[in-house]
Amino acid sequence: MDFNALCTQNWSRHFSVWIEDIQVVCHPVVAAPSLIQVNLLRKARALSRATAVVVVLLFSLHCTRPEAAPVVTVPETPAQEEPGERAEAKVYTETGEASWYGGEDDGFAGRATANGETFDPRELTCAHRTLPFGAMIEVRNLDTGKRAILRVNDRGPFIRGRMLDVSERAAKELGMHGRGTSRVRIRSVDTQGKPAPIDPASMLGDAYTVQVAALADPANIARISKELQSAVGPVNLVEARTRGGVTVKRVRVGSYATQDEAQKASDLITKLFKDRGLEPFITREN
């Protein structure tokens, strides 16, 4: 019979024959072997059987063990941005001090806003210096954590250090009605309150200008206007009323197509009139 090395049955049969051969060879050739010889032969047989069993088991395990699966290396792919992350990166954000208007004593209720609407303190609206009219923003009060979605329909605040003016109702929802001012963070959103970029088309058609001061005294208005006209460019005077009901003239310089151009003019005015305590800021003409 041919011997097949890959067949476990052939190996088992082969070792059985080998054991029998050992037994035949080890039969005593004398009639009366000594006790020591008999014991040695018995131990040899037992050891041979045990060794054969171990070898057969090891070989069987080796032959029946499944082949290891090949290792496949998958190249890493760059992480994909979530749609919300891309939108969030384009939204308008700003952090600063906010105040509110529309109370019984400030006289703004019922007056025309900068976009021509009648100001209603019970509506969720706000005033911002540069954001386009109709823009929706989420305002988060950094002091209280409360939020509100507001619509821009007015210009302001025209007070040093202020970023946003909200209606009386908005002040209540934000938890700042009794405090007067709060530090807030704003971001542009859509009508559903989800983060969204400002429509570029809505930013066109309303030029930027630099407001230098709001003055009531005619002599001061004439003097500062003359100096600004000589050093920077054309001056515009816009009549307005303060919270206390005082009529003032907002002294503004230039008309700029981009905010960068307006910023350059603002920096120049700050440099030229730094000893006068003037702190110009950028706003829209309308």
Image (spheres, rainbow, N blue to C red):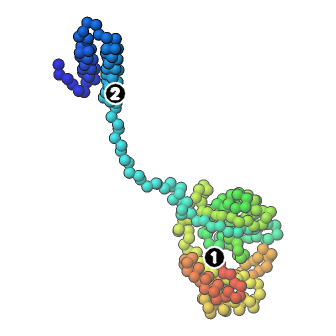
In the image, what residue type sits under mark 1? Thr
Residue 117 visible in rendering: no
Residue at the spot of label 2: 58
- Residue 217 vs 139, above or below: the answer is below
Name which residue lies at 56% across and 63% down: 91
Q: Residues within 10 Å of mark 1 (few under 14, many from 20)?
A: many
Residue 101, percent from left and from top: 75, 68
Name which residue lies at 61% across and 56% down: 193
Residue 92, percent from left and from top: 58, 65
Q: Quadrant location of residue 233?
A: bottom right
Q: Residues within 10 Å of mark 2 (few under 14, many from 20)?
A: few
**269 and 111: which one is in front?**
269
In the image, what residue type sits under mark 2? Leu
**99 and 48: which one is in front?**
48
Residue 59, percent from left and from top: 31, 27
Taking the view exactly as shown, the residue that stands out farthest to the left is 1
Query: Looking at the image, is mark 2 or mark 1 earlier in the sequence?
Result: 2
Measured in 3D between alpha carbons, the distance from the residue under mark 2 to the one under mark 1, in whole angstroms, is 88 Å
Report the mark closest to the observer, 2 or 1. 2
Name the quadrant of the N terminus.
top left
Residue at the spot of label 1: 283
SS at circle 2: helix
Q: Quadrant location of residue 158?
A: bottom right
Name which residue lies at 59% across and 56% down: 194
